[in-house]
Amino acid sequence: MIPAAAMMNHGSISHSDFPLTPTPPMSAPLPASCPLPAPFRIGPGECHLWDLDLEAPLLPGQEALLDPEEQARAAAFRVPLPRRQFSTTRSALRLLLGAYLAQPPGLLRFCLAPHGKPGLAPPYAEVGLHFNVSHAGQRALIALTADHPVGVDIEAHRPLGEDGAGLAAMICHPRELAAWKALPQAGRLHDFYRIWTGKEALSKALGLGLGLDFRQLELDAPGFPGLPPSQPSLPGGWQLHVLEAPAGYSAALALAAGTRISRHSFHAAAFPAAVPWPATGNRP
């Protein structure tokens, strides 16, 4: 579901802050899932994208991998679905990061960047492993890269209702909005979520959160917005991938142009032999 707060103009970033580069605006769907990568190594210029089925059964003790703060956040959800979304996705993230880092997943700690993007806390922050997570409905995506930030977003389609045009006006560039209004009614829902997930993924990759004014960003322009001057250490140019998603969902992935992407299905049962599993749950 689209957060209401995200439908506001939270920043003063202009389109001129994003110089156009010749990177392709959209890619074809990614290939079908492939087997687990062994031994969980990711090299420069690579992205591993993990698909999660949030209806899959949890392993015994999997939720115990969450640290006390995460367990408190999970308990604060009064509705079962969002509680399961959070607990399953966060425990899966811990299992994956533990496998890549060869560390007990229950001992990992996270920190937040200035705009709220989560990352690994020291001492693992120095490793350079980047990740981003998104979940919606019964699906989740976890993207990992070794040498540059990454952003991923998945959204479950919800009817736009009578205020669909108003919602589109809050996230679309004027030219995008005109093109969206010209679509047949049947095509507007899918295109709305294509635009939303693409901009959300890019905003997350840049670490800007709600600080990026979506109305100033035109995904379908001949060139695609490149590297902001404020982040010169990143490789130049960004590429946006429209991801293959189950019926009723849209998803997108934003990362440095030229990154090699492999897609994998997450199965918690594959991890006990690959990850040092804490015998008594999480520890301080």
Image (spheres, rainbow, N blue to C red):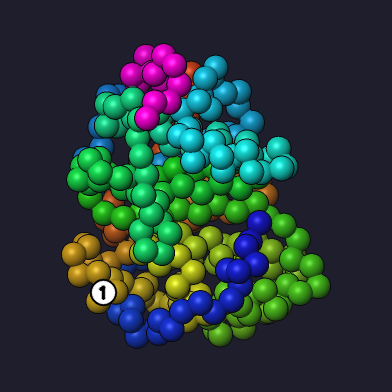
Q: Is residue 258 above or below residue 167?
A: above
Residue at 22% from the left image edge and 50% from the top image edge: 147
Residue 111 pos. (x, y %): 36, 49
Quadrant in which residue 280 is drawn? top left
- Residue 272 inside the magenta-drawn segment: yes
Q: Which residues are magenta?
A: 271-284
Q: Is residue 211 above or below residue 262?
A: below
Which amino acid type is shown beneath numbered disc 1?
A: Ser
**Residue at numbered disc 1:** 230
In the rendered structure, the answer to whether residue 275 lies left or right of residue 85 reads: left
Q: Is residue 202 visible?
A: no
In the rendered structure, the answer to whether residue 212 lies left or right of residue 144 reads: right
Residue 207 pos. (x, y %): 37, 62
Q: In the picture, which quadrant includes the C terminus?
A: top left
Residue 18 pos. (x, y %): 33, 78
Count of numbered circles in the view: 1
